[in-house]
Amino acid sequence: MHRPILFLALGAAGSLAPLAIATNVDDHYCYTQWEDVSTIDNAPYDGRFTFFRVRFEPSSDFGGGGGRFGRGRGSDKKWDHDTPRAERHFMKILEELTILRPKMDCGAIFAFGEPESFKYPIAYVSEPGFWTQTDEEVKGIREFVGKGGFIIFDDFGGSHWYNFEEQWRRAFPELQLQPLPKTHPVFDAFYDLRDRQLPGAYGQAEWFGVFEDNDPTKRLIAVANYNADLGELMEFSDEDFTPIPLSNDAYKIMTNYVIYAMTH
């Protein structure tokens, strides 16, 4: 299988659970799920690959809310599920597999449209079943994709699809969410996942994608892990909470997303 030259072809046998790697980290505070958003301390962009998590005002229709971006400590903000452990663990995997030199301690947290958000090529949106957008955020997500950005939607299922689809159509009325065929290059970008299933969390899991001009031969600009929660599988991969094979699959899928996005 061809592997982009940007990445090292390391063996994939055995568990991908994060190792205890001694790394130099920046001395600043990492926002943690449930905390007040005033504690968000994004380090200045320094060129390293950084996990970019999108924040938004959670819809109150399904029990979200709590002020702008769900400000209060203890409020369920939805967008912050599994942070910072999911991204920390994933960055350890990328450090072992690639030469990206990822930022290891904290990711970046911005809303679509914030000036700093355009410095990161891949955006991760957790719980899009509660996703809402201001007019500025709609403009921002369109600009993000227009500049070549790639978006991962994760941790939603069941009827939450309807809100996700509504918000997507609000931002991109011309672009359709389509089932993502296993023949697509994203499934063979690094790991061969063409015979694998998306680990389900809320029912039968399915991959959906969005293509430039709705043309599957053109760039994949977004992927949706419907009925799945890869973030949780990464967050708890160092504990006896999730099965190792499922966490391994989550890391492999996310690694393929990154490699595809960085090479297309």
Image (cartoon, grey):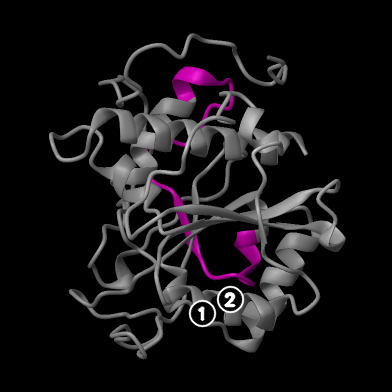
Q: Secondary structure at mark 2?
A: helix
- Residue at coordinates 62% horizontally, 39% vertically from top-left? 47
Residue 214 position within the rendered picture, expressed as x and y whole percent measured from the top left: 82, 61
Against 130, residue 225 (above or below) is: above
Residue 262, position as x, y percentages in the image: 69, 37
Q: Amino acid at mark 2?
A: Glu
Residue 181 visible within the image: yes
Looking at the rendering, which quadrant does residue 129 occupy? bottom left
- Residue at (26% x, 29% y) in the render: 244
User: Label 1's element?
Assistant: helix
Name the residue type under label 1. Tyr
Q: Which residues are magenta?
A: 95-117
Name the residue beneath numbered marker 2. Answer: 165
> Label 1 neighbourhood size at 10 Å, few (<14), some (14-19), many (20+)?
some
Q: How many marks?
A: 2
| Residue 151 sits in quarter | bottom right
Quadrant into which the C terminus falls: top right
Question: What numbered label is drawn on residue 93?
Answer: none
Q: Are discs 1 and 2 less than 8 Å apart at CB?
A: yes
Classify 10 Å Cα crowding around label 2: few (below 14), some (14-19), many (20 and above): some
